[in-house]
């Protein structure tokens, strides 16, 4: 299975930039989108009824913000629009799809840059989410987590680590949570296969940082450790434009 994840920074906007043409060329088995900023009824029919795919949309109460979507050639056994975590579903940041051999979490994690309150919300979201997936893992479920995590884990994961040590997205407490995620048995698929620097998934638009590859790697695929050997490749599609993020993906050798 070829699984892709992409923060599109507005699904209606990216449709105008050739998204449908790109999708027709790539045709992944599963495509997870974040920051769609739209409800299903605001989207064109050629997208919501894209041939060959089951499509699912989840939008939050904050108009023009948040939102996730899932396109899948394979119909999941079940799709949930909730993490089932009390107090953290109001922004509708996740779609959970059950493919039998694994649970897929498509998540748009909160951004903590706006205020101290938003940073606290982000950290609480992190903690509750990790407790949730660790519990499912302990029950024997295979777990795939993808999306915009909004944090660069290590210094190798952003172009200018020293300049951003006090910026949300690279704070010690955010990075410590990612350490805990790994310690709980969740594998960063890209970093497990690629040790080299200068691989990023987000670039600031205002400073034209993409042209200079001054970026951050904040979009990920994590898998529970029992699925690690089923990941035959992990990649970043930095050449795909249309958003301030680019798609990331994995090839997963499991039965659907």
Image: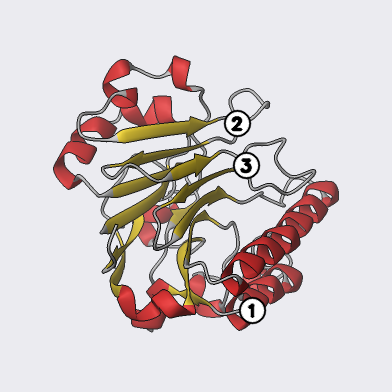
Q: Quadrant of residue 129?
A: bottom right
Badge 2 element? loop
Q: Which mark is residue 65?
A: 2
Give the foreground label among 3 and 2.
3
The percent position of residue 173, horizontal first and vertical second, equals: 75, 71
Q: Nearer the viewer, residue 141 or 66?
A: 141
Q: Nearer the viewer, residue 176 or 185?
A: 185
Viewer can see residue 252: yes
Marks 3/2: CA distance? 17 Å
**Residue found at x 46% / y 43%:** 78
**Marks 1,2: beta carbons within 8 A:** no
The numbered mark, 3 or 2, whose residue comes first in the sequence reads 2
Q: Nearer the viewer, residue 4 or 156?
A: 4
Q: Which residue position holds label 3?
A: 82
Marks 3/1: CA distance? 25 Å
The numbered mark, 1 or 2, whose residue comes first in the sequence reads 2
Q: Which residue position holds label 1?
A: 179
The percent position of residue 154, horizontal first and vertical second, equals: 56, 77
Give the foreground label among 3 and 1.
3
Q: Residues within 10 Å of mark 3 (few under 14, many from 20)?
A: some
* Quadrant (top left/top right/bottom left/bottom right) for the N terminus: bottom left
């Amino acid at each position: 299975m070829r699984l892709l994840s992409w923060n599109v920074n507005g699904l209606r906007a990216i449709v105008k930039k050739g998204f449908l043409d790109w999708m027709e060329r790539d045709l992944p088995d599963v495509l997870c989108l974040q920051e769609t900023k739209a409800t299903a009824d605001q989207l064109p029919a050629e997208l919501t009824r894209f041939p060959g795919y089951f499509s699912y949309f989840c939008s939050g109460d904050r108009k023009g913000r948040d939102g996730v979507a899932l396109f899948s050639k394979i119909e999941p056994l079940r799709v949930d629009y909730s993490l089932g975590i009390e107090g953290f579903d109001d922004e509708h940041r996740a779609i959970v799809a059950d493919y039998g051999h694994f649970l897929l979490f498509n998540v748009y994690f909160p951004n903590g840059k706006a205020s101290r309150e938003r940073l606290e919300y982000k950290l609480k979201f992190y903690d509750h989410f990790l407790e949730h997936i660790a519990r499912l893992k302990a029950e024997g479920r295979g777990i795939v987590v993808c999306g915009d995590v909004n944090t660069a884990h290590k210094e190798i994961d952003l172009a200018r680590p020293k300049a951003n040590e006090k910026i949300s997205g690279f704070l010690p407490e955010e990075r410590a949570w990612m350490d805990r995620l790994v310690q709980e048995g969740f594998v960063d698929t890209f970093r497990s296969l690629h040790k080299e620097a200068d691989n990023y998934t987000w670039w600031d638009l205002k400073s034209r940082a993409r042209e200079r590859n001054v970026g951050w790697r904040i979009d990920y695929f994590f898998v529970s450790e029992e699925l690690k050997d089923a990941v035959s490749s992990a990649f970043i599609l930095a050449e795909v434009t249309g958003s301030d993020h680019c798609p990331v993906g994995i090839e997963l050798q499991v039965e659907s």
